[in-house]
Amino acid sequence: MSEAMLAPKKRLVMATKEMVEAQKSCASAFTPRAETDTTQAAKVWHEDDNFGGQATKALVMVLKTRGCDWLIKSGCTMCGYFNDSFFDDVSADHIILQFENAMREHQGEDLIKIYTSGSFFDEREVPAAAYTQILKRVGETTGRLSVESQPQIMTDAQVAEAMTHLKEFEVGIGMESAHDDVLAHSVNKAFRFRQFVAGAELIHRHGARAKTYLVQKAPFLTEREAIEDTTTSILKVAPHSDVVSVNPINVQRHTLVADLYKHGAFRPPWLWSVAKVVLDASRELPDGVTLKCHPVGGGHARGAHNCGKCDKRAMKALEDYTLGRGTIRLERLFETPECGCYSRWQWELDNEGLLGAACWTDPVVW
Amino acid sequence: MVTQETTLREATVGPTRPEPTIEVTARDGGGRTTAWTVGETTAHTPLLLARPGLPLPPGHGVLLGPGEAVPTEAAGPVVVLEGGFSVSPAGDRPYPTGVWSRVTIDRARRLEGQLSLRRGRPPTSDIQIADEEYGDDETTDVTGIPEVAPVVSDEGAVAVFAEAGSAARDPAVLMPLLLEAREKTGPGRLLYAPGIGLPHQLALLVYAGVDLFDTLAVERASLDGLYLTSEGVFPAATTRFPLSGLDGLGIPAVMDPQALLAHNLAVHDRELAIVRAHLQNGTLRELVETRVRAHPASTAALRHLDLHGLDVLARKIPLTRDGHVHANTMESLSRPDVVRFRERIRNDYQPPEGADVLVLFPCSARKPYGLSRSHKVFARVIGDVQKAARIHEVIVTSPLGVVPRELENTWPAAHYDVPVTGAWDPMERAMIREQVAALLAKGGYTHVVSHLGASTHALIADFLPEGTPHTGIPHPTRYEAKDLLRAALREATRQGNAPAWPRRRLADAKALATWQFGPAAADALFAEADDTGGRPPVIRVFSGGQRGKQLAQVVPQRGLLSLTIHGAKALFAGGQAKVVEIDDFVPRGTVFAVGVKQADPGIVPGDEVVLVHDGEVRGVGPAVAPGPEMTVLKRGPCVEVRHHV
Ligand code: SF4
Ligand SMILES: [Zn+2]
């Protein structure tokens, strides 16, 4: 039987299996770094952040762990976190040591942000002993902590325990899209929207805050579909979130997205699209929810980009909005597009679906 | 909708949709022109499907996306793409099949033997799919990468080659996929390649089998500021010369986007007309070889097509036809029709029995060679030799390699032109050596005489038998060379006997038959053959003497054996005929697709086919369509009947 004759659902499932297999092999093509010192955090830095509506100074650390459990099994199609994790058997002691060593850099910042390239609540990544110890230490110092996790992994007990030590607690959830179709067939996410809603409820029940990360332009979406996906996702997750962060997909090494990109089958979103999403969603955002967008790699080929001439202008407009300066620059962007690539972008929105290619990065001139 | 499906509608959409018909009006290479009829409307492919509202002259089709309204002024066919390419947040649409298959193919290639897992990790061999809601069958193991084939829709008159856009980035990927898509589509439907085809690529894409194009690639290139020509692509910003007058726009002061688009569309439209004209003239290949010079990657694309498409294309290209082959370029060496000629020489051809003295001659500019001045001189020298019936003349040439004299009127031997420089390039050298070696390996020659020019002789001298006289010195056409040749031939034929001329002619006709039908069929046809008649180059083949049954005749115009009913019966009785099963009628004139019940899929246009009804031979004549098309197409001529019972 030819592929085209398969029933829609069956075909979808086959394609999904293919995607999962491909994503897994992308990750397996990756060779982990040589033995490194797992008593030192991968990275430590200071930054300015907006935490619970307050401009705050933060100490940020990326801890070395065995990495996201989902990524080991399968992994999301755009996630290059294994580039920063996948250390063998990092013990609780070593994780505590990493944390303590990083805390030596603490210069009175109000906020501690801990990234683990996975789920902070997953005991396979951060053993319970280390979890408790870190919470205790943060409680003794600033009392304000920000971490990330998949929502279905955290337990009531874990969040309750955290709140006994902390004054303020923010949990970031990489939701990516509020649409289960996109999660299943484009992102290969380990959870679905309803699990996000349950997780966000759990977080709020204990008085913690939820920060929801969304992607823009999961693979296999056209530019237009991606705009629709992200705009509606923002509005769907907003009632369950304190902060919504829109992240245009950037091409990270050893991912399925990188593979698609290499073959001209994936183009990171246009900054025009990102600006449109933020502008459209900002008009309908419920009160008390903060929308942020800081495109990583913006203006570069592997990140959200326009033609190269007008990228700075769009990035500035997004930055202004994220810093709380309103939508004026975003509006002006579309009132006076000023750049020739604007019509190219519009053409692509209208025609990409007919092309038979997800998107083309360069014209085909052979 | 999962796969992209196309529906053909009439310009005005009515409640009933008539069954579309496709009639092939001309063929060349893998390409064709067709008349595509829906209801009252007939369009001619290769056809351009334009997005509504573009500045184009009339005569093209219209391409609509899902849900778009049919423009009222549309005169040509309207192709509506239904369904989408990708996951829609609202719907249940899966991936763009194009992108997906492309990725998988590459992946399958690269991943072989490379699936070892990360260091220090337990292997997780089962594939995890996250959502339990998707049911049991989703969690079954998938071992290996599923086989990938281009996805074409199964319904309607138009098959969409959905991969085209993403595969087009790399011609090495595009060409095999395109050929496969063409095969899957079948001759009865039109193949549409969305989003590809700049003007200079159209000839090649049509030659590979695309029937329908759209304007998307041109629109996109225009927005990217590219100035398109039939010969290649330039950045408009650096193009100092004015826009062509094609668009009727004169010379705009600046290259504004609208003028650029109008120019590019006009060039595109005109190029498609040129392609159609060449196709109907039988010179599409020559056009392709010219156009692919636009870019090294275009030339590579043609080579990939020849490489992957040799068999597929050779099954569609007529065995004989009018018109010359211009072997202008290196790619001429790998033309499927030319390669087919050489392959038949190597694999099927058996030299004439009793002709055991081989003489190698250089080719002549004039074709067939026998009409040239040099070959007339050679003929006179051979005429001076008493036992000339032992001599087998073979011409060494490019791009055909070796052409035995009895094949000199075949196509393309009698119809090719090469730019003669006297020096062979490395590819030609290798090819000529291979062909000469294959001929010598067939055995049966007691003597070889080389009357080649010095450079050609040197090219093959190392595998000629020891002591082979080289008589083409100082030059094959010089007086001294003539004498040398005469002496060498006399010496070579001195001992032993020559066959009688009628027998030798019979052997020549049979040698031609081995090339034309294959050795087994030649045996069947000549099993009872015992005499010849006619004045060369016409040869009539008889069984039971000249007053017996005539089996076949070699006519110089075609250069091939034409069968009589007796010949057809002999082939059919031997189980070696290429058979077309027809309904119960006496075939006269032309047999059309409606009358064909079954056809040998190996039939190539130009093949002698035997018309059979219910085990009974009814007629014989040359095929005008490839076998597979005779059964699939509902209209169009299939066999030109020469003789009937
Ligand atoms: S869940 Fe998060 S860390 Fe894990 S693979 Fe997905 S994006 Fe990466
Ligand atoms: Zn721009």
Image (cartoon, coloured by chain):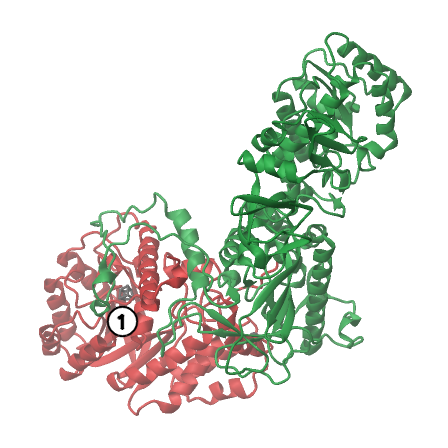
Chain colours: A red, B green
Query: What is the x, y in percent for residue B173?
Result: 51, 52
Instruction: Kindly indicate the quadrant of the structure image that contains residue A94.
Output: bottom left
- B43 displayed left or right of A18: right
Residue at (79% x, 72% y) in the render = B245
Describe residue B369's horizontal placement relative to residue B209 as left or right: right
Using the image as rendered, state which of residue B26 and residue B131 is in the foreground: B26
Give B335 or B424, whichever is nearer the viewer.
B335
Between B235 and A10, the one nearer to me in the picture: A10
Q: Is residue A108 visible?
A: no
Q: Position of residue B331 (x, y in %)?
A: 67, 44
Q: Position of residue B204 (x, y in %)?
A: 64, 55
Horizontal side of residue B26 vs A43, given as left or right: right
- The C terminus of chain B: image quadrant: top right
- How crowded pointer 1 is (Cα within 10 Å; few <14, some 14-19, many 20+) is rated as many
Q: How far across and how far down the image is residue B399, in percent?
A: 70, 37
Relative to B622, residue B537 above or below = above
Give the residue furthest to the right: B479
Say what amino acid the circle numbered 1 marks: Leu
Name above or below for residue A52 compared with residue B218: below
* Dot 1: element: strand
Tell me which residue sits at (55%, 62%) in the image.
B191
Ligand 1 falls in which quarter? bottom left
Asked where in the image residue A230 lies, by quadrant, the reply is bottom left
Q: To which chain does the residue with label 1 belong?
A: A
> Is residue B373 placed above or below A180 in the rendered structure?
above
Q: Nearer the viewer, residue A95 or B257?
A: B257
Residue beneath the point at 81% across and 12% down: B490
Q: Which residue is mark 1?
A: A59
Question: Total of numbered circles in the picture?
Answer: 1
- At a point 52% along the width and 88% down the height, the residue shown is A332
Query: Is residue B108 visible to us here?
Result: yes
Q: Looking at the figure, which quarter contains the N terminus of chain B?
A: bottom left
